Image: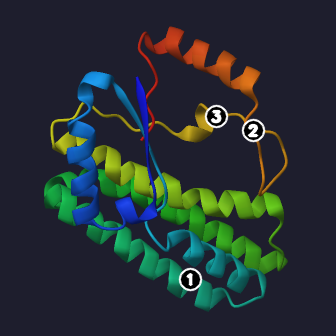
Amino acid sequence: MIVMKFGGTSVESAEAIERVAKIVGSRLKQSPVVVVSAMAKVTDQLVSMGHKAASGASESSLELLKALRDRHFQTAKELLGAKRGATLAPKLEAFFTELENFLRGLAAVRELTPRGSDYLLSFGELLSSLIVADAFAVRGLNAGWVDSRECLVTDATHTRASPRRRSNRDLDRRRRNDDHRPPALS
């Protein structure tokens, strides 16, 4: 097994994700586990959305969200085509709806806590990983999306959390027993 981590610029566009798929495809004999960051600049955009929403600038925050949504849907369409992109759309839309609801909540309470910040920023990786996993599958790579929140346990030190190694080993062991296969992240 090899863990392959790709940062934001590696998954910033359809063209970049195509390159990642080729790199991963060349390493299939090593049983890659792929981890991706948010698309380039998305984390900064999420931070800005959170600050705007928490300061009461809800409409400004939602305008940024619309642009972020459009970017992800356009990238998915370019990578997957209209038909496959349509099957991914409800999954992406569910995350965008959850994100919109969260931003509206921030605007209502006018506060962004460290825990809330972690939650907000997690959407970047969740969205990009969905697109990358589908792009891999369309290109014949045996890939499946795994929600990292279900296979990684951290301490409660929000914005600087550390993995809980023992809990993660136990979770990994249970997951392997349940699935009868090694875990894969995308």
Q: Secondary structure at mark 3?
A: loop
Tag shown at residue 62:
1
Could one spot residue 22 in this view of the protein? Answer: yes
Question: Measured from the top left, where is residue 10 in percent x and y?
Answer: 36, 60
User: Residue 154's mark?
Assistant: 2
Question: Is label 2 in a helix, a strand or a loop?
Answer: loop
- Specify the amino acid type for callout 1: Leu
Say which quarter of the image contains residue 167.
Answer: top right
Residue count near mark 2 (Cα–Cα under 10 Å), binned few <14, some 14–19, many ≥20: some
Question: In whole angstroms, how far apart are the C-alphas of marks 2 and 1?
Answer: 30 Å
Residue closer to the observer: 20 or 126: 20
Q: Nearer the viewer, mark 1 or mark 3?
A: 3
Residue 86 visible in image: no
Image spot of residue 126 (x, y percent): 50, 52
Label 2 or label 1, whichever lies nearer to me, is 2
Q: Position of residue 2 (x, y in %)?
A: 41, 29
Q: Quadrant of residue 47?
A: bottom right
The dot on residue 152 is: 3
Q: Give the residue displayed 85% in from the left and 49% down from the top.
A: 157
Residue found at x 45% / y 80%:
66
The image quadrant that residue 44 belongs to is bottom right
Q: Reply above or below: 66 against 60.
A: above
The amino acid type of the residue labelled 3 equals Leu
In the drawing, does residue 30 fall left or right of residue 170? left
Q: Residues within 10 Å of mark 1 (few under 14, many from 20)?
A: some
- Looking at marks 2 and 1 on the same chain, the residue that comes earlier in the sequence is marked by 1
User: Mark 2 and 3 residues: CB-CB less than 8 Å, in contact?
Assistant: yes
* Left or right of 160 on screen, residue 5: left
Towards the viewer: 15 or 72: 15
- Image marks 1 and 3: residues in contact by CB distance under 8 Å: no
Q: Secondary structure at mark 1?
A: helix
Q: CA distance from mark 1 to mark 3?
A: 30 Å
